[in-house]
Amino acid sequence: MNKKTNDQLLDLVNKATAGDKQALETLVASVQDIVFNLSLRMLGTFADAEDATQDILLKMITHLSSFRGDSSFTTWVFSIAANHLKNYKKHMFAHYPLSFEYYGDDIQNGKTKDIPDLTQNVEKDILAEELKMSCTNVMLQCLDTESRCIFILGTMFKADSRVAGDILGMTPEAYRKRLSRIRKKMAGFLEQYCGEYGNGTCKCKNRVNYAIQNHRINPQQLDYTSAVQIPVQTMLDVKTAMEDMDDLSQDFSFCKSYQSSERMKLLLQELLKSTQISVIRNS
């Protein structure tokens, strides 16, 4: 996610729509990580986020000629991504929706004892960290899609209320009120149940085998602990690119940012080489 000014990005857009392959590749590289992170938080799993990111970037490419620079390029991409993800029905949790009531009941009443060791010789501390990141990310699925998007934009990307309002089609005042209510709801749930971020009794290390048994983590596929984190400064550059930020941010330390997976990068490389993209560039 290379830092570029809006003027530089607009110049790249003009070159890309004129058929410049390198400019198109640079544009995709400049936003693929932020699109992936938004998709990961909205959809809950790495696999679904990879698929959705490819769809979103293809949609971005096919609509490049409509970008006129009235907003920042990053904001424009966020609008495309948010609209796509709010209506995305192909991910796992679209078929198996969650609720805070279900999540709380599972924490209190899940049968975590008398389960054999399922760690497959992977260190338990590593699996506990994987579970912590997975659990807090999946917890976002307890929110409806619009509330989830509001929370992610405000907490993870720390978007200015004017920018976020434009992305989501609501007034800045309405966005701020919704964000405040959602944060309180999320913080209240963590405080009540989570022993990692609140005062609850749930400890990830005690639930590792239960999580493996229920296919919530896989010792042979550790998505979170194997992913490369994005430097904090890079995410600050993203929010600065959209506009000055307001002072509504609140620390939810589980909202970490990750680089796009190698699998997704390879898929994007194939996409950019495809005949379909050649047609788009020459249209």
Image (tube, rainbow, N blue to C red):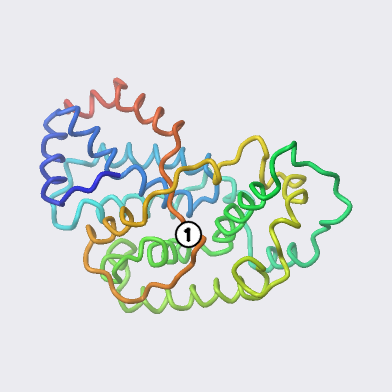
Dividing the picture into quadrants, the one containing residue 191 is bottom right
- Which residue, given by chain and number where applicable, does mark 1 sit on? 255
Assign the C terminus to one quadrant of the image.
top left
Specify whether 161 is left or right of 194.
left
Residue for point 27% across, 27% down:
277
Q: Where does the image place residue 122, in percent across and percent down from the top left? A: 70, 39
Please indicate whether residue 74 sits to the left or right of residue 38 in the image: left
Residue 263: give x, y in percent of width and height.
46, 31
Specify the quadrant of the image occupied by residue 21: top left
Image quadrant for the N terminus? top left
Identity of the residue drawn at 36% across and 56% down: 232
Q: Quadrant of residue 15?
A: top left
Which residue is the extreme one toward the right? Answer: 114
- Camera-side residue of 32 and 128: 128
Who's the residue at 52% across and 63% down the image? 144
The spot of residue 53 in percent (x, y) is 40, 41
* Disc 1 packing (10 Å; few <14; some 14–19; many ≥20): some
Instruction: Say which element carries label 1.
Output: loop
Estimate the x, y position of residue 234 in percent, counting from the top left: 31, 53
The residue located at (68%, 39%) in the rendering is 219
Furthest-top residue in this view: 275
Q: Looking at numbered disc 1 in the image, what kind of residue is underneath it? A: Cys
Q: Is residue 263 above or below residue 246?
A: above
Lateral position of residue 96 relative to residue 224, left or right: right
